Amino acid sequence: MSLVVAKFGGSSAADGIQIRKIKSIAERGPGMRYIVVSAPGKRFATDNKITDMLYLLKTQIDIGAPYEQVLQVVKERFLGLEADLGVSVGIAGEFAAIEEKLRGGVSADYLASRGEYLSAKLIAAFLGYDFVDAAGLLLFGEKGKFLYEETNKALAGELAKHGRAVIPGFFGTLPDGSVKTFSRGGSDITGALVARAAAADVYENWTDVSGFLMADPRIVENPKAIKSISYKELRELSYMGASVLHENAIYPARLAGIPINIRNTNIPDDPGTFISADDTDGSGQLITGIAGNRDFTVIGIYKNMMSNEIGFIKRILSILEDYSIPIEHIPSGIDTVSLVIADKFLGDKLGDLIEDFEKKLGADSIELFENMSLIATVGQGMASVPGVAARLFGALTEAGVNIRMIDQGSSEMNIIVGVETKDFETAIRAIYKTFIQ
């Protein structure tokens, strides 16, 4: 019998109807022993996610604004779920404890984590599973660095005590016992960590889409589904904006060699997308997927005889470190280097950064290319087939898209191009049309 660890996202835990779907899925067989859940998501388009409400609650407190109404909305949502599911887990008492903590001051991480915590308590009671708190099991160091091996040991020891359990996603604890959350979507990471600790045969990630698509359906009409994909390909696509699965959720599963299956709670018979160390599904498609991100700035630095100057790149990186600015890519030539930086990290630092470059690098010229977007075309088969780049560049030329930057990884599994943001969607459609039959 296969041991399955499943994670159900916010859309799957949004209301009693969705939670009953979780129960139906869990009852299909005895293999689904450990379940990780998110906080309740939106029930309808104009609804609010519980996590968003909890962050709003913290903001109201911090600015000294009345927060009682927001707290009451969250409380009523959980009380309604408790009544609808016909369970009794002490939601009223949990909120009394939260209100008591609010009067003494609480962190945003603690408040945000209560969504997953209460969701897990309700779903565990409804399924008849044990509730296992993530606090004290998912461990962060004093400086907030996640401790993978310590967490794996603690989780494995606790899970061995429970035949079936529901665990809240998204958070763990610091050495002093205070709550620390992952970034948004971090319940995916918790699911992968539980899968590793339980030595699962498969990690099922249940959401509101049937796996990955080969391109963004908001840009490409009816893109094909990806039946199977390698960890490496998924990492590339997730990093470049394909957002079905949190990019950091891949590492724990990959480390343990556990395949990930992206499934749709609303269409449980759909096989979804399988993610593993194996090659892609052999469908004959050269390209596995296309993904991209907007809002980048490219800084082009030209200096004659740069290639002969020892430590030039090191000085660039040192300046960027002083400004706490990470780099996405560094394509370079003999006398040129381009720095691709996300606008969110530049903020109002760009002017000062350029001034420092001019003073400390002695460059002959520095050019700025703003309003840029990056598009990654990803596929393991690309490395063994000649002419892929030519086809890609030809497609963009035919579509009237000017390529401002080209970068290819040493694995030859992806080709990244930089285009002006105004051409972003046109470029993705052109690449898709060329490679996807």
Image (cartoon, rainbow, N blue to C red):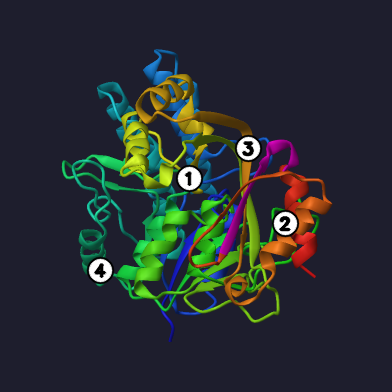
Q: Nearer the viewer, residue 82 or 110?
A: 110
Cα distance between the residues tagged 4 and 3: 45 Å
Q: Residue 269 at what x, y percent from top left?
A: 66, 73
Residue corresponding to mark 3: 372
Query: Is residue 76 at all visible to an observer of this figure?
Result: no
Earlier along the polypeptide chain: callout 1 or callout 2?
1
Three-letter amino acid code at disc 1? Glu
Q: Nearer the viewer, mark 4 or mark 3?
A: 3
Badge 4 or badge 2: first in the primary sequence: 4
- The image's mark for residue 156 is 4
Q: Which mark is nearer the camera, 1 or 2? A: 2
Q: Which quadrant is the C terminus positioned in?
A: bottom right
Determine which residue is flagged by label 2: 393
Inspect the magenta stretch and tell me whether residue 156 lies in it. Answer: no
Q: Which residue: 76% across, 67% down?
A: 436
Distance of label 2 from label 3 (alpha carbons): 17 Å
Seen in the picture, residue 251 relative to 271 is either above or below; the reply is above
Residue 354 located left or right of residue 418: left
| Cα separation between marks 1 and 4 | 36 Å
Residue range highlighted in magenta = 414-423
Please say whether residue 418 is one of the residues in the magenta stretch.
yes
Q: Amino acid at mark 2?
A: Phe
Query: Which residue corresponds to mark 1?
Result: 328
Confirm or deny contact between disc 1 and disc 4 (CB under 8 A): no
User: Tag 4: residue type?
Assistant: Ala
How far apart marks 4 and 2 lie (CA) works out to: 49 Å
